[in-house]
Amino acid sequence: MLKLQLRDALAALRSGGVVAYPTEAVWGLGCEPTNSSAVNRILALKRRDWRKGVILIAAEFAQLEPYVQLPSNSAMRRAQATWPGPVTWVFPASNYCPPWISGSPELTADTVAIRVTAHPVAAALCRAYGGAIVSTSANRQGQPPARSATQVRMMFGERIDALAPGALGNLEKPTTIRHVVSGMILRR
Protein backbone atom coordinates (compact mmCIF):
# COMPACT_ATOMS: atom_id res chain seq x y z
CA MET A 1 0.00 0.00 0.00
CA LEU A 2 2.76 2.47 0.95
CA LYS A 3 4.59 1.81 -2.34
CA LEU A 4 1.41 2.76 -4.22
CA GLN A 5 1.20 6.01 -2.22
CA LEU A 6 4.83 6.73 -3.14
CA ARG A 7 4.33 6.13 -6.88
CA ASP A 8 4.38 9.82 -7.88
CA ALA A 9 7.37 10.60 -5.65
CA LEU A 10 9.32 7.65 -7.06
CA ALA A 11 8.54 8.71 -10.62
CA ALA A 12 9.71 12.24 -9.82
CA LEU A 13 12.95 11.02 -8.23
CA ARG A 14 13.68 8.75 -11.18
CA SER A 15 13.11 11.58 -13.66
CA GLY A 16 15.36 14.08 -11.87
CA GLY A 17 12.58 15.84 -9.99
CA VAL A 18 12.23 17.34 -6.54
CA VAL A 19 9.98 15.67 -3.97
CA ALA A 20 8.67 16.64 -0.56
CA TYR A 21 8.19 14.04 2.16
CA PRO A 22 7.71 13.80 5.92
CA THR A 23 10.70 13.06 8.18
CA GLU A 24 11.24 12.59 11.89
CA ALA A 25 10.61 16.29 12.71
CA VAL A 26 9.92 18.41 9.63
CA TRP A 27 9.01 18.05 5.98
CA GLY A 28 11.99 17.48 3.73
CA LEU A 29 12.86 18.23 0.14
CA GLY A 30 14.72 15.53 -1.70
CA CYS A 31 16.13 14.39 -5.00
CA GLU A 32 18.74 12.11 -6.54
CA PRO A 33 22.08 13.09 -4.95
CA THR A 34 24.18 12.72 -8.10
CA ASN A 35 21.83 14.89 -10.19
CA SER A 36 23.36 18.37 -9.92
CA SER A 37 20.39 20.01 -11.69
CA ALA A 38 17.92 18.56 -9.18
CA VAL A 39 20.08 19.54 -6.21
CA ASN A 40 20.49 23.04 -7.64
CA ARG A 41 16.69 23.29 -7.96
CA ILE A 42 16.33 22.47 -4.27
CA LEU A 43 19.02 24.98 -3.32
CA ALA A 44 17.29 27.66 -5.43
CA LEU A 45 13.90 26.86 -3.83
CA LYS A 46 15.46 27.17 -0.38
CA ARG A 47 17.69 30.11 -1.34
CA ARG A 48 20.48 28.08 0.29
CA ASP A 49 24.18 28.45 -0.44
CA TRP A 50 25.53 25.24 -2.01
CA ARG A 51 28.69 25.58 0.07
CA LYS A 52 26.80 24.49 3.20
CA GLY A 53 26.14 21.01 1.79
CA VAL A 54 23.01 18.92 2.30
CA ILE A 55 22.10 15.80 4.25
CA LEU A 56 21.60 12.41 2.63
CA ILE A 57 19.18 9.86 4.07
CA ALA A 58 18.72 6.19 3.34
CA ALA A 59 16.84 3.13 4.52
CA GLU A 60 20.12 1.32 5.27
CA PHE A 61 23.77 2.26 5.55
CA ALA A 62 24.72 0.36 2.37
CA GLN A 63 22.82 3.02 0.38
CA LEU A 64 25.03 5.75 1.92
CA GLU A 65 28.34 3.92 1.87
CA PRO A 66 29.51 5.14 -1.58
CA TYR A 67 29.37 8.76 -0.34
CA VAL A 68 31.57 8.30 2.74
CA GLN A 69 34.99 7.20 3.88
CA LEU A 70 34.58 4.65 6.61
CA PRO A 71 35.86 5.81 10.00
CA SER A 72 37.43 3.60 12.66
CA ASN A 73 35.43 0.59 13.81
CA SER A 74 34.63 2.27 17.14
CA ALA A 75 33.36 5.44 15.40
CA MET A 76 31.30 3.34 13.01
CA ARG A 77 29.76 1.39 15.90
CA ARG A 78 28.89 4.71 17.60
CA ALA A 79 26.92 5.83 14.52
CA GLN A 80 25.31 2.47 13.86
CA ALA A 81 24.09 2.30 17.47
CA THR A 82 21.79 5.26 16.70
CA TRP A 83 20.46 3.92 13.37
CA PRO A 84 17.92 3.64 12.10
CA GLY A 85 16.93 6.71 13.99
CA PRO A 86 16.91 10.50 14.26
CA VAL A 87 20.66 11.13 14.50
CA THR A 88 22.57 12.58 11.55
CA TRP A 89 26.30 11.88 11.48
CA VAL A 90 28.97 13.87 9.64
CA PHE A 91 31.41 11.50 7.92
CA PRO A 92 34.51 12.18 5.83
CA ALA A 93 33.27 12.39 2.21
CA SER A 94 34.47 9.88 -0.36
CA ASN A 95 35.78 10.87 -3.78
CA TYR A 96 32.41 9.71 -5.18
CA CYS A 97 30.49 12.29 -3.13
CA PRO A 98 29.72 15.30 -5.38
CA PRO A 99 30.67 18.78 -4.14
CA TRP A 100 27.05 19.94 -4.38
CA ILE A 101 26.28 17.36 -1.64
CA SER A 102 29.31 17.78 0.62
CA GLY A 103 29.51 21.54 0.14
CA SER A 104 32.58 23.71 0.00
CA PRO A 105 35.68 22.21 1.66
CA GLU A 106 36.28 25.60 3.31
CA LEU A 107 32.96 25.28 5.16
CA THR A 108 32.45 21.54 5.47
CA ALA A 109 36.04 20.16 5.56
CA ASP A 110 35.30 17.50 2.91
CA THR A 111 32.55 15.89 4.94
CA VAL A 112 29.02 14.72 4.26
CA ALA A 113 26.06 14.51 6.66
CA ILE A 114 24.16 11.21 6.52
CA ARG A 115 21.31 9.48 8.36
CA VAL A 116 19.74 6.04 8.23
CA THR A 117 16.17 7.12 8.83
CA ALA A 118 13.60 5.23 10.86
CA HIS A 119 10.75 7.38 9.55
CA PRO A 120 8.42 4.92 7.77
CA VAL A 121 7.66 7.10 4.74
CA ALA A 122 11.20 8.42 4.24
CA ALA A 123 12.68 4.93 4.66
CA ALA A 124 10.09 3.40 2.31
CA LEU A 125 10.87 6.07 -0.27
CA CYS A 126 14.62 5.30 -0.10
CA ARG A 127 13.97 1.55 -0.14
CA ALA A 128 11.67 1.76 -3.17
CA TYR A 129 14.04 4.17 -4.93
CA GLY A 130 16.94 1.84 -4.23
CA GLY A 131 19.34 4.43 -2.87
CA ALA A 132 20.07 7.46 -0.77
CA ILE A 133 18.25 10.73 -1.39
CA VAL A 134 18.89 14.34 -0.47
CA SER A 135 17.11 15.39 2.70
CA THR A 136 16.99 19.07 3.49
CA SER A 137 14.25 20.86 5.40
CA ALA A 138 11.36 22.21 3.35
CA ASN A 139 11.77 25.92 3.95
CA ARG A 140 13.47 29.00 2.60
CA GLN A 141 16.74 29.87 4.30
CA GLY A 142 16.08 31.65 7.58
CA GLN A 143 12.41 30.62 7.78
CA PRO A 144 10.92 27.86 9.94
CA PRO A 145 10.69 24.44 8.28
CA ALA A 146 7.34 23.17 7.05
CA ARG A 147 5.56 20.94 9.54
CA SER A 148 2.65 19.95 7.29
CA ALA A 149 1.97 19.09 3.68
CA THR A 150 -0.18 22.23 3.48
CA GLN A 151 2.76 24.41 4.54
CA VAL A 152 4.95 22.72 1.89
CA ARG A 153 2.36 23.44 -0.80
CA MET A 154 1.96 27.06 0.37
CA MET A 155 5.74 27.62 0.34
CA PHE A 156 6.63 25.86 -2.90
CA GLY A 157 3.41 25.17 -4.83
CA GLU A 158 4.00 23.67 -8.25
CA ARG A 159 7.77 24.12 -7.98
CA ILE A 160 8.06 20.66 -6.44
CA ASP A 161 7.28 17.65 -8.62
CA ALA A 162 5.65 15.35 -6.06
CA LEU A 163 4.64 15.14 -2.43
CA ALA A 164 4.80 11.80 -0.58
CA PRO A 165 1.87 11.64 1.85
CA GLY A 166 2.38 10.87 5.51
CA ALA A 167 2.69 12.20 9.02
CA LEU A 168 5.77 13.64 10.67
CA GLY A 169 7.62 11.68 13.31
CA ASN A 170 7.39 12.80 16.91
CA LEU A 171 10.51 15.01 17.16
CA GLU A 172 9.95 18.66 18.04
CA LYS A 173 13.23 19.85 16.45
CA PRO A 174 15.32 18.69 13.48
CA THR A 175 17.60 15.73 14.11
CA THR A 176 20.74 15.95 16.20
CA ILE A 177 23.92 16.20 14.11
CA ARG A 178 27.16 14.64 15.40
CA HIS A 179 30.66 14.23 14.02
CA VAL A 180 31.45 10.54 13.56
CA VAL A 181 35.18 10.78 14.32
CA SER A 182 35.02 12.97 17.44
CA GLY A 183 31.49 12.14 18.56
CA MET A 184 31.01 15.89 19.12
CA ILE A 185 27.45 17.23 18.88
CA LEU A 186 27.26 19.83 16.10
CA ARG A 187 23.51 20.50 16.39
CA ARG A 188 21.33 19.46 19.29
Image (cartoon, rainbow, N blue to C red):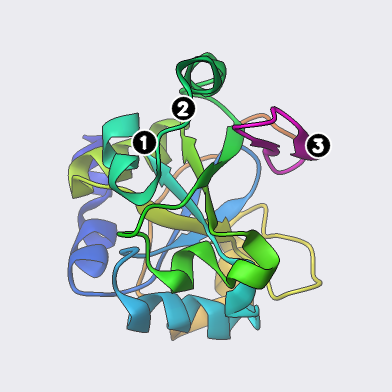
Q: Where is residue 58 in the image (x, y as percent from the top left)?
A: 37, 40
Q: What stretch is highlighted in magenta?
A: 173-188
In terms of image quadrants, where is residue 64?
top left
Q: How crowded is mark 3: few (under 14 residues within 10 Å), some or many (20 or more)?
A: few
- Residue closest to the eye, 47 or 100: 100
Which quarter shows the C terminus?
A: top right
In terms of image quadrants, where is residue 31?
bottom left
Which quarter shows the N terminus?
A: top left
Q: Position of residue 20 (x, y in %)?
A: 46, 61
Is 177 part of what is drawn in magenta? yes
In terms of image quadrants, where is residue 97?
bottom left
- Residue closest to the eye, 87 or 79: 79
Which circle's residue, 3 or 2, is located before the other in the chain? 2
Q: Mark 1 points at which residue?
A: 123
**In this rendering, position of residue 175 left or right of residue 116:** right
Q: Do the residues labelled 1 and 2 touch (CB within 8 Å)?
A: yes
Disc 2 element: loop
Q: How crowded is mark 2: few (under 14 residues within 10 Å), some or many (20 or more)?
A: many
Q: Name the residue under label 3.
A: 188
Name the kind of residue labelled 1 in the image: Ala
Q: Is residue 187 above or below residue 10?
A: above
Q: Do the residues labelled 3 and 1 touch (CB within 8 Å)?
A: no
Disc 1 element: helix
Q: State how many labels appear.
A: 3
Q: Is residue 168 visible?
A: no
State the residue at coordinates (42%, 75%).
39
Which circle's residue, 1 or 2, is located before the other in the chain? 2
Q: How far apart are marks 3 and 1 (CA)?
A: 22 Å
Name the kind of residue labelled 3 in the image: Arg
**In this rendering, position of residue 150 left or right of residue 126:** right
Is 97 part of what is drawn in magenta? no
